[in-house]
Image (cartoon, rainbow, N blue to C red):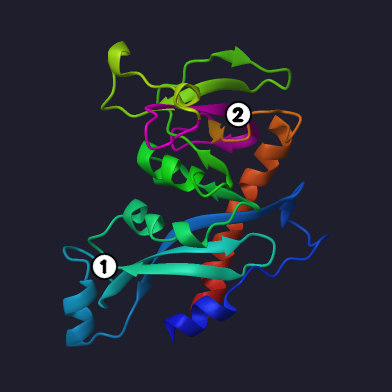
Amino acid sequence: MRALFDHVAVPLARPGTPGAWLRSWRLMAIDGVMIDVPDTEANLATYGKPEGGTRRPFPQTRTVGLSECGTHALIAAELGTIYQGERELAGELRDRVTSDMLLIADRGFYSYDLWRSFLATGAALLWRAWATITLEPIETLADGSYLAEVSNKSSRSSATRIPLASVNGNLRLATHIPVRVIEYQIEGHTDSEGKSETFRLISSILDPNQASAIELAQAYHQRWEIESSFRDFAR
């Protein structure tokens, strides 16, 4: 069944499909969901069940999927236990990502290692970043975005700082990778404390001529289409 799924589950969007493209990039998103599975001893032993105060009586699998935003086509999924994290499972989807894609992800997926891993596929990346990640501006661009670097936190000293450009783009050797940062607020959108929430995106698309800050901000919000994909799947 897995081999059959891998064969038939492919992107479906055609040129002009609404919400499916940013210029020449196919908009794809990764996200996770918890799915109930039958309450059998085998499933309980394999996947586990939430404990302590939960009202969900069934074993659950934590699933991370890769979906085409414009069509809701789920082209890859990795099923894990409730004890596995979304980042771990997301890494297993790497081989299904191709260079014609713009991969969108929420802030829970960001880590330096995962960013570097998906960047190596040749795909363009557009992920939300935590406010706690240090992103010092290197250059402010005409569209209001700016260039910064994400870094391997284990390499803090200047002696071990290895920019990507200094190793001819070899991602395995680099400790610092350039990104473009897009920050914006949406009128009427507030956080849990009632304050205007700032969206902070990082992208591997460094040139505003390839995609403007506004285009990237609009593209990021197509990420929520994967939640519709999960709802379609669960019906």
> Residue 47 appears in which quarter of the rendering?
bottom left
Left-right relation of 79 to 10: left
Q: Is residue 70 visible?
A: yes
Q: In the rendered structure, does residue 170 fall within the stretch colored magenta?
A: yes
Which disc is residue 220 wearing?
none
Q: Secondary structure at mark 1?
A: loop
- Amino acid type of disc 1? Thr
* Residue under pointer 1: 81
x%, y% of residue 225? 61, 59
- State the residue in front, 173 or 7: 173
**In the displayed structure, would residue 98 be above or below residue 171?**
below
Q: In the rendered structure, does residue 141 fall within the stretch colored magenta?
A: no
> Residue 172 appears in which quarter of the rendering?
top left
Q: Is residue 132 visible?
A: no
Q: Residue at x 68, y 20 (%)?
A: 144
The answer to whether the residues at label 2 and label 1 have Cβ atoms under 8 Å apart is no
Which disc is residue 182 wearing?
2
Left-right relation of 86 to 189: left
- Amino acid type of disc 2? Ile
| Residue at far front of view | 168
Q: Secondary structure at mark 2?
A: strand
- State the residue in front, 79 or 122: 122
Highlighted range, magenta = 169-197
x%, y% of residue 91? 38, 55
x%, y% of residue 217? 66, 38
